[in-house]
Image: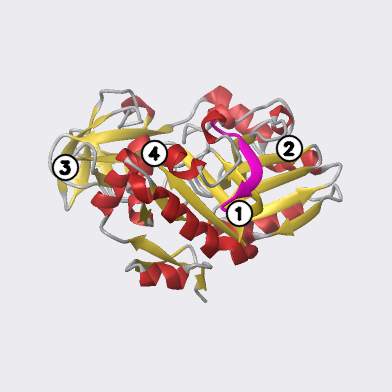
Amino acid sequence: MIKNVALAEHHIALGAKMVPFAGFNMPVQYSGINDEHETVRTAVGVFDVSHMGEFILKGENAIDLIQKISSNDVSKLYDGKIQYAYIPNETGGIVDDFLTYRIDEHTYLLVVNASNIEKDWNWISKYNTYGVEMKDISDKTSLFAVQGPKATEALQSLTDIELAEMAYYTFKKGTFAGVANVLVSATGYTGAGGFEIYVANEDAKKVWDAIFEAGAAYGIKPIGLGARDTLRLEMGFCLYGNDIDESTSPLAAGLGWVTKFTSDFVNSANLKAEKENGVAQKLVGFEMLERGIPRHDYEIVDADGNKIGRVTSGTQSPTLKKSIGLGYVDKAFAKEGTDIHISIRNQAVKARVRKPPFVK
């Protein structure tokens, strides 16, 4: 059964091409991926990402539960601060990657990927031996990501929150578009800067319309998931289900920076041993030196045609006008500047390892 976000009918009326994504009927594009991509890089665009999951964890021991299921050190958070992490499974892979928002000492908001809402909920519940009150507010919550260099100017007239003063990975609650108690955060998945607006479904249309009215002078446009993918790839950001999953090592995926062994978490002992022994493969960025678009699961080969890895994400970069991708390769080929080949329709097409972000 495909679910609809609160504004699905509105997106259809705007001419969006809708596709099933992560169990939801979602807008993949409106005016076209390249145009939408350019809008976010140069002006301001709005993504409806209400398919994402939101859990509230509350209670004296909420921090202990999150510390148990999270790879990162939640004790470093303060009120209004956000942290990126992943949920390790028991076999060396990743249940999901997610964000933790510290609302207060005993209240946290966890934001998870749409395709993993039920799986994550069950996983966290399994470890909840701490008496933490858990609430899944995913179906009641709409989420708009307003991204681009003009996002601050476009939104400031709608809120008393000083948007320009908000640091990366922080959030504030305030009145937004006349709606009280709206959560505004500064995380972003495009590299273009901007804000995420969390509102109750019943206020979604009012807030969406207000954003477009306020942003009209700045060339604001609705943006689909197609451009979200090209934008995040230009930054080298991982997408769950493509670049990381239940079978990928978080250390091979370059997530060592959010793996903190300051306290015990699920599978931490094994991950620590893996870190000490080193990984066999690494997730790298690459750009194509010859024509061809790398796609998910294409083989990566060496000059002699031996398989050395596989592509996890690939696209034609609208900004660079060339193809880029992410993929796992044997460690010997992971160094920046190393030439590799992508097997495209049985042709070995030349590429070069390049450290993301591809677009500065």
Q: Which residue is mark 3?
A: 348
Question: Label 3, label 2: how many angstroms apart (C-alpha)?
Answer: 45 Å
Q: Which mark is residue 67?
A: 2
Asked whether residue 311 appears in the rendered view, the answer is no
Residue 269 falls in which quadrant of the image?
top right
Q: Secondary structure at mark 1?
A: loop
Note whether residue 205 is visible: yes
- Mark 4: which secondary structure? loop
Q: Nearer the viewer, mark 4 or mark 3?
A: 4
User: Can you identify the residue that label 4 sits on?
Assistant: 150
Q: Please tell me which residue is depicted at 35% across the width and 30% down the height of the picture.
A: 356
Q: Are marks 4 and 2 in contact (CB under 8 Å)?
A: no
| Colour convention of the picture | secondary structure
Residue type marked 2 = Gln
* Left or right of 76 on screen, residue 17: left
Mark closer to the observer (4, 2): 4
Mark 1 or mark 4: which comes first in sequence? 4
Q: Which residues are magenta?
A: 167-177
Residue 129 placement, left or right of 281: right
User: Tags 3 and 1 in contact by the CB under 8 Å rule?
Assistant: no
Mark 1 or mark 2, earlier in chain = 2
**Horizontal and vertical percent for residue 289?**
16, 34
Q: CA distance from mark 1 to mark 4?
A: 21 Å
